[in-house]
Amino acid sequence: MTNAHLKNREPHLAASSRKDNAPALRKRLLTARDTLSVTQRQQASAAIAAHLRTSMQQGLLHTATQRLPHRPVIAAFWPIRSEPDLRPLLAEWAGQCCDIALPQVVQRDAPLAFHRWQPGAPMASGAFGVLEPATRAECVPDILLVPTLGYNAQAARLGYGGGYYDRTLAKLEAAGHPYVAIGIAFALGRLAAHEHEPADHDMPLDAVVTEEGWLMGHGATAHHRDA
């Protein structure tokens, strides 16, 4: 990983002529993801976890965490609907190398807050029915695993449209807090170049991880590999 991954970064500026086809893309990708069987989602989630585990040992995550003067804080997410399920990996990491945090929607049109989580900790239903840690222990993440519905060859993310992660990354950026943002998606979310261009407010990711491997962003040669 180069120093650019931990330096401040500017949002990607999209062409002013960009058509807002995001709602149609979201509908298409959600439908496709929902058609995956439970077994397919479990197998793909396990493959994503394996790529992340390897990276923590000798790749991008290893480099990012080794540079920190403190125990790393990794912000992840509790899966809803047909999202990838990384909970077994999060429990593993919580017992070994990192503090795990989960997001809380504090209010609409605001950045997310993150609270530390431990396996077996009590959970409470938050905004949109997403489970959050019932005990509040707010923290600032160093690495964010971002739920990603769609992505393109430059690892530009298509999310659910609420803008919560874009506002969160922008807040970290403004505060001068170095971070690494990694999209977590199924490979069926891959979009062609002409299908998706980031909006002006979209914050870039460092990479996207799917069951097929890593797709690097930020101007790196975008290709799937173990990172």
Image: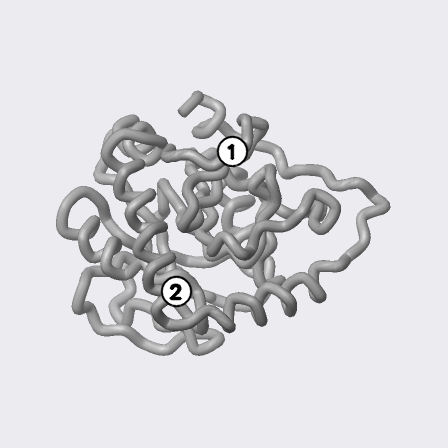
For label 1, the SS is: loop
Which residue is the site of mark 1? 223
User: At which x and y percent is residue 113?
Assistant: 41, 58
Instruction: Say which residue appears at 19% left-offset and 68% top-offset.
Output: 121
Q: How many marks?
A: 2
Decide which of tag 2 and tag 1 comes sooner along the chain.
Answer: 2
Residue 68 in view: no
User: Does 156 appear above or below 134?
Assistant: above
| Residue 61 visible in the snapshot | yes
Q: As shown in the figure, which amino acid type bears the numbered disc 1?
A: His
Q: Residue 197 at what x, y percent from top left? A: 71, 46
Query: Residue 129 placed where, x, y %?
Result: 43, 78
Instruction: For label 1, count other residues whose C-alpha is less than 10 Å away and answer few (under 14), some (14-19) or many (20+).
Output: some
Lateral position of residue 182 relative to residue 152, left or right: left
Instruction: Left or right? Give the position of 193 relative to 90.
Output: right
Image: 156 above or below 159: above
Give residue 41's mark: 2
Mark 2, residues whose alpha carbon is within 10 Å: few (<14), some, or many (≥20)? many
Q: Residue at x 23, y 49 (%)?
A: 99
What's the amino acid at mark 2?
A: Arg
Q: CA distance from mark 2 to mark 1?
A: 23 Å
Where's the N terminus, which quadrant?
Answer: top left
- Residue at image position (63%, 38%) is 11
Q: Quadrant of the C terminus?
A: top left
Quarter assignment of residue 91: bottom left
